[in-house]
Image (spheres, helix red, strand yellow):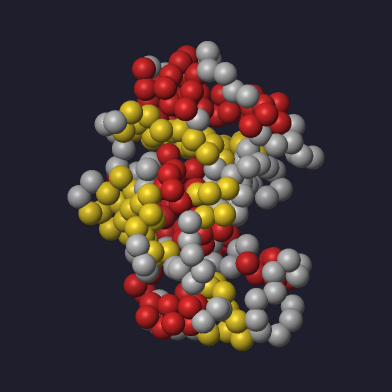
Amino acid sequence: MYAFTLEQPKTLADAKRLTTGGAQALAGGQTLIASMKQRLLRPENLVDLGGIDALRGIQVDGKQVVIGAMTTHANVAGSAEVRKHLPALASLAEGIGDRQVRAMGTMGGSVANNDPAACYPSAVLALGATVVTDRREIAADAFFQGLYTTALEPGELITSIRFPIPTKAAYAKFRQPASRFAMLGVFVAHTGSGVRVAITGGGNGVCRHAGLEAALSKSFTPEAVAGVAIDAADFSGDLHASAAYRAHLVKVQTQAAVRQANG
């Protein structure tokens, strides 16, 4: 590592003041600390958000589940409220990384980082969630803007995420064996206004698939997925899987998610 300053504010107001000055916010640190060790990032000032109680917690507000940005994966997975109202999200959280990662990693950190193979972005996008920051509210469709890129402005902090409660939902992923990131993951949500399908692990960032959404809105069955064209050109290949194989996995994981959602 290298020398840097570490601030540990106890209030959101103090965190906003410090990050507005150009410091780097630190959530769970599962990505940031590793990047610093490899010298991929070299922030001189870190602001640890872990001591801000207002950024943690889970509550049900009408037909929405509201989750604080600093809520850990383990707490999402173990929450009785999430398991009752959004079991697909609890299951997703339970499958992230290993026990140590789930104990430290946070929802807000994952969403803000927008790793192309992360699980949470697919849930946020498929459920049509709203990302709440210290400055505004951002709809999921406007939040994710490509590889490691979001609508967040410099110094802007996620405070919570509001998830509408769907009629049915499920997440299925094919794990990369070493990292447990999604080699390809699909989150399917059946809502009153139709079906939303979000794909992660494709290499270019989380995205929706119009063809799958249209087919499943007509018939929410695994069989409806079979006739949907999946273009391999929309995906990336690497040492773990070719673009064609990832395109194949889209159908496999979508069908698996629909089966789970239908019980």
Q: In the rendered image, which quarter is residue 123 located in?
A: top left
For the point 53% across and 73% down, the residue is 25
In percent of width and height, residue 19 lies at: 50, 77
Q: Is residue 95 left or right of residue 243?
A: left
Residue 110 appears anywhere in the view: no
Q: Tell me which residue sits at (36%, 67%) in the image.
A: 135
Quadrant of res 237? top right
Viewport quadrant of the N terminus: bottom right
Quadrant of the image containing the C terminus: top left
Closest to the observer: 112 or 33? 112
Drawn side of residue 220 relative to residue 150, left or right? left
Identified at 76% across, 39% down, the residue is 238
Instruction: Work out which residue is located at the far left of the displayed protein and give it.
Output: 62
217 shown above or below 185:
above
Residue 177, given in percent of the width and then of the height, sits at: 69, 43
In the drawing, does residue 94 fall left or right of residue 205? left
Q: Residue furthest right?
A: 239
Name the residue: 51% across, 69% down: 154
Question: Can residue 209 be seen at all in this image of the molecule?
Answer: yes
Relative to the observer, which residue lies in front, 233 or 194?
A: 233
Count how many numbered circles sit on residues in the image.
0
Location of residue 217 in the rendering, given as x and y in whole percent from the top left corner: 37, 22
